[in-house]
Amino acid sequence: MIANSAAAASNDVPIVLQPSSPWDINYGKNSCRLSRIFGSGEDSTAFYLEKYDIGSMFTVLMAGKTLKHFARPDSIIRFSNGGGALELTAGQFGSYGPSVVAIDGTLNPDELTHNKHEKTYSTSGDAQYTSTGEGEAADRWSLTPAQMQSITWIEISHGKNSLRLNTGPIDKPIAALDKCVDDLVSSWGLNPSELRTITHQAIPDVEAIKSIASDIQQHYPSTAIALGSQATISVRLIIDTSGHVSDCQITNVTEAKDFDDYACKAFEKSGKFEPARDKNGNPIKSSFTTNVVYRMR
């Protein structure tokens, strides 16, 4: 059932919105974003997928007044084939208003069941380090062209209520997004083809990570403490073949104007990793993305 207005839907049928703009690819400095608008007027809803590296994981965002009943952490996002995202974060997205964001989106339903292996290292202070490295081959969960073409909608639901965006076949837009990502990692001095031969991603040394988390939390910015500011900072590390951090970049900061790049300094000083390896067991220069979560307690 296609509803012309979000208000026309009942609890028993989904609100369904059609595209009102073409797909758009944004080539950012640290990420690639695929976006589209659905619906119009009061029903105008923004949707985007954003990737920060080669691999199957992406950030997914949905925003609009249509999200007013869904902008909550316990809502569920699913693609038509069973893929989706867990652990949603509710917020506001500019003029669109209510929004949800998830950093662990995937098009593969099998991978979705494995995303709960994320580990968080913290001590008793205010900073937490959250690992989002998968430790598996970048293409382990890749889908066939036919499987990709079969994905035609994304839906967010809470209880009996749901909002569906009819994306149409998503194979070509995702191919364009992945081409952008290849160009992105090449700009970091990495080889996209070589990265796809990785059978084991770089693995952080647990004790080193605990030390880094302690170091970061002791550097919780005084201005942020005074204002009660909190933040989630995404960090991209380049890991050389010896397992050392050769470069670190802050790739995105959420509502964190009072925070600095100290997290990168801590990783560059103390970061230790088992380097990524190809199918022959040879170490490969690679990237590793993680999050530093600043929370007041």
Image (spheres, rainbow, N blue to C red):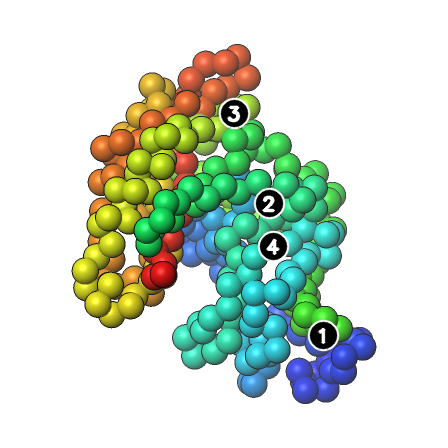
Percent coordinates x, y for residue 49 in the rendering: 52, 56
In the depicted view, which residue is nearer to us: 103 or 107? 103
Please name the amino acid that badge 3 sits on: His
Viewer-side residue, 210 vs 108 = 210
Give the number of the mark in front: 1 or 2: 2
Q: Is residue 91 visible?
A: yes
Q: Secondary structure at mark 2?
A: helix
Distance of label 2 from label 3 (alpha carbons):
18 Å
The label on residue 200 is 3
For the residues labelled 3 and 1, the Cα–Cα distance comes to: 40 Å
Residue found at x 60% / y 54%: 85
Residues at circles 4 and 2 in contact by the CB criterion of under 8 Å: no
Question: Residue visible at 51% across and 63% down?
Answer: 89
Nearer the N terminus, badge 4 or badge 3? 4
| Between discs 3 and 1, the one toward the N terminus | 1
Most extreme residue toward the left is 222
User: Which tag, 1 or 4, sits closer to the chain's start?
Assistant: 4
Q: Residue at x 45, y 24 (%)?
A: 276
Image check: 245 left or right of 289? left
At label 4, the amino acid type is: Ala
Secondary structure of the residue carrying numbered label 3: strand
Q: Nearer the viewer, mark 2 or mark 3?
A: 2
Position above or below: 177 against 6 = above
Residue denoted by label 1: 161
**Mark 1 or 2, nearer chain start:** 2
Q: Which mark is residue 139?
A: none
The numbered disc on residue 116 is 2
> Label 4, on which residue?
85
Q: CA distance from mark 1 to mark 2?
A: 25 Å
